Amino acid sequence: MPSVREIVDRDPEADPITVLTAYDTPTARIVDDAGIDVVLVGDSIGDAVLGHGSSLPVALDTMATHTAAVARGVDDALVVADLPFLSYGVSEAESLRNAGRMLKEAGAGAVKLESGPHTVELTRRLVELGIPVQAHLGLTPQHINRVGLQRQGTDEAAAAEILDLAEAHEEAGAFSLILEHIPANLAALVTDELNIPTIGIGAGPETDGQVLVVNDVVGLSEHPPPFATAFGNVRKEMVAAVETYRDEVVGGSFPSADETHVEEGLELE
Ligand code: KIV
Ligand code: NA
């Protein structure tokens, strides 16, 4: 796995940074083989895989299990583990230990956490201990109950706060910053002001890289966010395969002679 240095030292103008989520080994292998730079085990697993409809119920153990599954499928990309709701920020010692599990047990190369005024010092401590941190500003879905899912940074005060927090997290040692669902002109300004790479989602084309949820990219999500694009239609393929299987079982054509073995010498009463 590359160190975060390789991501930080890239010239993103020449070579934009590609980030995509994965939650399981076969998907991680596909994402890695495609040449994606960073595989994010997002707490979006709560919505994309576990049916919770949000990320809030996702447990730390769940993130550890799925991060380990992803790490087993990845040879070349950096694996980043998202820290789930309330696994950080409640107490410093607990936050540090929880984040450390993602590296020690699960095989991640870095953690991501949803950032705010309360995570500047935590980011500094994690980095000091050797746990690289990816910051995340703009729409932070763990705050869904407070802010909903709408675009953030849409007035001058909110935009200035995002820029201030971005600079504070860079100064605290974050190796990269995700900017979610903010105006493209604000994302461009933050990208200009920071030295660390910015990764956008619903933040326009001028960040140093892009991130999306893999279920949205392959066309598996029922309700993708407005800023995601499906680059394929895996849902349609799966529906067709499952319906055909069912029809062939019911119609008697599966299993056929090709899929059947009769043991000739076997004497049965
Ligand atoms: O959980 C997630 O997948 C994320 C990305 C969308 C940035 O946080
Ligand atoms: Na997340």
Image (cartoon, rainbow, N blue to C red):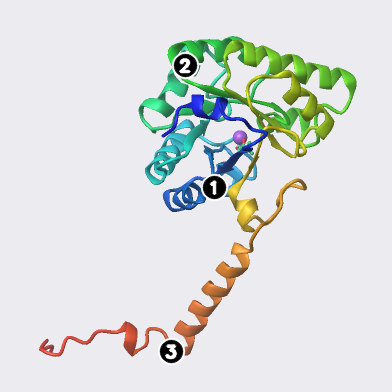
Asked where in the image residue 168 lies, by quadrant, the reply is: top right
Q: CA distance from mark 2 to mark 3?
A: 57 Å
Return the residue at label 3: 252
Q: Going by the image, does 151 lie left or right of 165?
A: right
| Label 1 SS | loop
Image quarter (top left, top right, bottom left or bottom right) of the C terminus: bottom left
Return the residue at label 1: 50
Instruction: Name the one closer to the observer, 72 or 66.
Output: 72
Q: CA distance from mark 1 to mark 2?
A: 26 Å
Labels 1 & 2 near each other (Cβ < 8 A): no
Where is residue 3? Give x, y as percent.
Answer: 45, 27
Instruction: Indicate if the residue with disc 2 has its beta carbon within 8 Å of ligand 2.
Output: no
Where is residue 92? Give x, y as percent.
Answer: 51, 11
Where is residue 75? Give x, y as percent.
Answer: 40, 42
| Label 3 SS | loop
Q: Amino acid at mark 1?
A: Leu
Q: What label sits on residue 96 in the rendered view?
A: 2
Is residue 183 visible in the rendered structure shown here?
A: no
Pick whichever of labels 1 and 2 is earlier in the sequence: 1
Pair 1/2: label in front: 2
Labels 3 & 1 near each other (Cβ < 8 A): no
Quadrant containing ligand 1: top right
